[in-house]
Image (cartoon, rainbow, N blue to C red):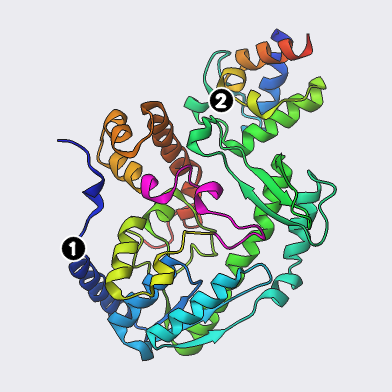
C-alpha cells in the first residue's frame, strides 16, 4: 500500500506539480477538493496505473471512491492486483 | 420563495432594444467601425446575433459569413441560407474544407481516434461524448462514439492523448472560421460580433482564439432559454427556433448536452440561474425533475468548469504591467 501511495505521489509531483513537492496531498486528502486533477488529469492517472500495475480499469471503476486520494488509489490498486 | 422555471422570463422587446442600443454604441463609438461581421451557422445563437445586429445597424451594415466544411450537416447549409434571406443581408460563402485539409485537421483527428479504435477508417463517422448527469458519473470523462458504414456503433473511453488530439484537431475549425471573420472585418472596416450565450460564456464552452474571439458579444449575458425567446420576438425563422442545439463539429450528430453540458440546455439554464442566486439544490430538484444529489452534482460541475476554463477567458499573462 505504502509503495503505491509513494509511486502515485511521485507521479503527481512530476506531472501535475512541475516537481514542486510542497503541493503533495496528504494520504487522505481529496484531489477533487484540492482541485488537483481535472478530467484530463484523471485520464493521465488511469494510464499511469494501468501501465505501472498491469491492470485494466473499467469505466464503472472511475469513481472518487477509487481514485480521489492517495490512500483510496492504493487500496483500489491493491484490490485489483490481488 | 419557491423556485419556479419562469425565473428566466424576460421582457423580450425591452431587452432586444437595450442590446441594440448597446451594439450601436459599441460599434460606432467604442470600436469606431462601420458595421458587424457575423459567422452564421444556422443555429439559434448566431441567428439571434445576426438579427440583433440587423435591427441595431440596418441590413447594409451587417455581413453574414457561411463557412461550411466537409462535416457540416445539410441542415446547417440550408438554415444559414434561410436566415440570410430572412435578414435581407449580404453574405459571403467561404467553404473551409480545403483550408482544414491544409492544416491536416481531419487526418490528425482520425489518427487520434484510431489510437483508441484501430479499425476506424475512411467512411466511418464519429463524435465525442460526456456522461449525462442521469448517468451518475463522478468524473467528466470523454468517450468517442464511432459508427461504421454499415451503421454499427461502438463507444470507447478516450485516453488523455487521444482526447487532446481530437480536440486540438477539431479546434482548427473554429479558429479557421474566426480568421475568415477577421479577414472580412478588416476588409470592410467592420467589427466581429461573437455569438456565445451565457451558458457557453460562463462554462467556457468555446475555443480560445476561435469562437471565443470577438469584438462584441451581444448575447453573452443571456441564458439560452432567453436567446430562444428573443429570437422568436425578432422573427428568426421557425425552423431555426425549433432546431435542437448541436455542435456541428463532428461527423455523427451531436447535441451540446452530450458534448459539454451534463443536461439539456433548458434544465442547465435553470441550474445555472439557481446556483447564481443561491437556490438550495432541493428546491431546484423538485422543479426540474432531478434528484437533489443530481443537482448537487450539476452545481459542483458548474464550479469545476468555471475553474478549469478560467484560462480561456484570460488575456496573455505578463511578468509586469505594461500600461500604468
Q: Nearer the viewer, residue B197 or B79?
A: B79
- x and y percent of residue A21 in the render? 62, 24
Q: Nearer the viewer, residue B297 or A31?
A: B297
B79 displayed left or right of B289: right
Chain under label 2? A
Q: Is residue B91 above or below residue B324?
A: below
Left or right, B28 with reference to A4? left
- Residue at 51% in and 57% down: B206
For the C terminus of chain B, give its image quadrant. Answer: bottom left
The crowd level at tag 1 (other Cα within 10 Å; few <14, some 14-19, many 20+) is: few
Chain letter, disc 1 residue: B
Q: Which residue occupies the foreground of this view, B8 or B168?
A: B8
Residue sitting at 40 percent across and 52 percent down? B199
Q: Is residue B40 above or below residue B278?
A: below
Report x, y in % for residue B27: 33, 79
User: Can residue B69 be seen?
Assistant: yes
For the image, the number of numbered tags is 2
Q: In the rendered view, does B170 fall on the left or right side of B4?
A: right
What residue is disc 1 on? Answer: B11
Q: Is residue B311 part of the magenta span, yes or no?
A: no
Q: Position of residue B173 (x, y in %)?
A: 62, 66
Residue where numbered disc 2 is placed: A23
Say what secondary structure mark 1 lies in: loop
Label annotation for residue B320: none
Per the model, the C-alpha gap separating discs 1 and 2 is: 50 Å
Magenta stretch, main secondary structure class: loop
Amino acid at each position: 500500500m505504502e509503495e503505491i501511495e509513494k509511486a502515485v505521489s511521485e507521479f503527481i509531483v512530476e506531472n501535475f506539480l512541475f516537481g514542486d513537492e510542497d503541493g503533495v496531498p496528504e494520504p487522505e486528502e481529496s484531489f477533487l477538493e484540492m482541485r488537483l486533477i481535472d478530467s484530463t488529469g484523471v485520464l493521465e492517472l488511469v494510464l499511469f496505473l494501468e501501465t505501472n500495475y498491469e491492470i485494466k480499469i473499467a469505466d464503472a471503476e472511475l469513481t472518487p471512491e477509487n481514485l480521489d486520494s492517495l490512500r483510496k488509489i492504493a487500496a483500489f490498486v491493491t484490490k485489483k492486483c490481488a | 420563495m419557491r423556485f419556479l422555471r419562469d425565473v428566466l422570463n424576460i421582457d423580450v422587446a425591452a431587452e432586444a432594444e437595450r442590446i441594440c442600443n448597446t451594439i450601436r454604441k459599441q460599434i460606432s463609438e467604442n470600436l469606431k467601425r462601420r458595421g458587424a461581421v457575423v459567422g452564421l451557422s444556422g443555429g439559434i445563437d448566431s441567428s439571434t446575433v445576426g438579427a440583433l445586429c440587423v435591427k441595431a445597424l440596418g441590413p447594409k451594415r451587417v455581413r453574414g459569413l457561411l463557412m461550411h466544411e466537409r462535416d457540416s450537416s445539410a441542415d446547417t447549409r440550408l438554415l444559414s441560407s434561410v436566415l440570410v434571406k430572412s435578414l435581407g443581408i449580404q453574405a459571403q460563402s467561404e467553404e473551409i474544407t480545403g483550408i482544414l485539409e491544409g492544416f491536416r485537421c481531419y487526418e490528425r483527428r482520425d489518427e487520434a481516434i484510431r489510437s483508441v479504435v484501430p479499425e476506424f477508417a475512411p467512411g466511418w463517422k464519429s463524435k465525442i461524448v460526456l456522461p449525462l448527469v442521469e448517468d451518475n458519473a463522478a468524473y467528466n470523462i470523454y468517450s468517442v462514439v464511432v459508427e461504421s458504414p454499415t451503421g454499427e456503433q461502438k463507444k470507447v473511453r478516450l485516453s488523455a492523448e487521444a482526447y487532446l488530439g481530437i480536440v486540438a484537431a477539431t479546434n482548427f475549425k473554429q479558429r479557421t472560421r474566426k480568421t475568415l471573420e477577421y479577414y472580412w472585418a478588416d476588409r470592410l472596416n467592420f467589427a466581429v460580433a461573437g455569438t456565445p450565450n451565457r451558458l457557453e460564456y460562463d462554462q467556457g464552452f468555446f475555443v480560445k482564439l476561435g469562437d471565443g474571439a470577438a469584438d462584441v458579444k451581444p448575447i453573452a449575458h443571456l441564458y439560452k432559454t432567453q436567446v430562444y425567446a428573443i429570437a422568436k420576438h425578432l422573427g428568426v425563422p421557425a425552423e431555426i427556433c425549433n432546431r435542437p442545439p448541436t455542435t456541428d463539429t463532428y461527423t455523427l450528430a451531436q447535441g451540446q448536452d452530450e458534448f459539454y453540458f451534463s443536461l439539456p440546455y433548458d434544465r442547465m439554464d435553470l441550474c445555472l440561474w439557481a446556483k447564481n442566486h443561491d437556490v438550495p439544490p432541493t428546491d431546484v430538484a423538485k422543479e426540474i425533475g432531478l434528484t437533489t444529489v443530481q443537482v448537487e452534482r450539476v452545481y459542483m460541475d458548474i464550479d469545476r468548469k468555471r475553474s478549469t476554463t478560467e484560462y480561456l477567458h484570460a488575456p496573455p499573462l505578463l511578468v509586469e504591467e505594461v500600461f500604468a
